[in-house]
Amino acid sequence: MLKFDINILWTLINLIIFFVLMKLFLFKPIKKTLDKRKELIEGQFKAAEDKEKKAGELQAEYQSQLSGVEDEKKAIIAEARNNAKGEYDKIVARANDDAVKIKQDAKKASELESEKARLAVKQEIAELAMQAATKVVEKEVSPETNKMLYDQFLNESSDK
């Protein structure tokens, strides 16, 4: 039969007491320290995740701002080009108007000079005709005299 020894019983009781004491004084403080450490590490991981999430949000915000700046830059450049083209068109139109006015003024001046020259030639011809008429009246009129006066008139008018 099985013998039951009291030492085994005391050893078991000692082991149970030792286990309970170890649990109270050793395992609980170690578990408590490990739990605190675990909470600290989890808190650090959560803080890191929050910072990473915030960094991602900031990056997205900056990207959208950069996109907005790029669009604004393109709009400003397009507006500047339109303004420059409008100014260019105004300058070209003004230059064309000035050129047309200068041409018209030159044409008027040319016509005026031409008219003055025509009037001067007409007046000179009238004077020559008066001189010829005076000479004819002074002399006796004959066909030879007429021819001579006519030739003289032509020579004087061609000289002037």
Image (cartoon, rainbow, N blue to C red):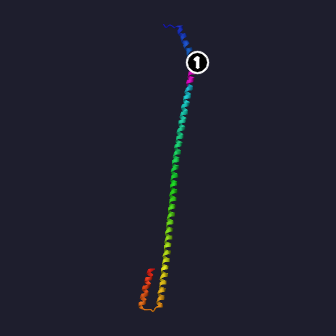
- By secondary structure, the bulk of the magenta-drawn segment is best described as helix
How far from the left and from the top, in percent, is residue 53?
53, 37
Q: Quadrant of residue 149?
A: bottom left
Asked if 27 appears above or below 55 in the picture, the reply is: above
How far from the left and from the top, in percent, is residue 81?
50, 55
**Picture residue at 50% right of the left edge, 72% below the top:** 109
Q: How many marks?
A: 1
The one of 14 and 154 positioned closer to us in this rendering: 154
**Picture residue at 48% right of the left edge, 77% below the top:** 117
The answer to whether residue 29 is magenta is: yes
Alpha-carbon neighbours of circle 1 within 10 Å: few (<14), some, or many (≥20)? few
The one of 94 and 140 positioned closer to us in this rendering: 140
The kind of residue on which mark 1 rests is: Phe
How far from the left and from the top, in percent, is residue 69?
53, 47
Circle 1: element type = helix
Which residue corresponds to mark 1?
25
**Picture residue at 50% right of the left edge, 59% below the top:** 88
How far from the left and from the top, in percent, is residue 132?
47, 87
- Span of residues in magenta: 21-34
The one of 12 and 28 positioned closer to us in this rendering: 28
Asked if 95 appears above or below 115 in the picture, the reply is: above
The answer to whether residue 136 is magenta is: no
Asked if 151 appears above or below 42 in the picture, the reply is: below
**Picture residue at 57% right of the left edge, 26% below the top:** 36
The one of 111 and 142 positioned closer to us in this rendering: 142
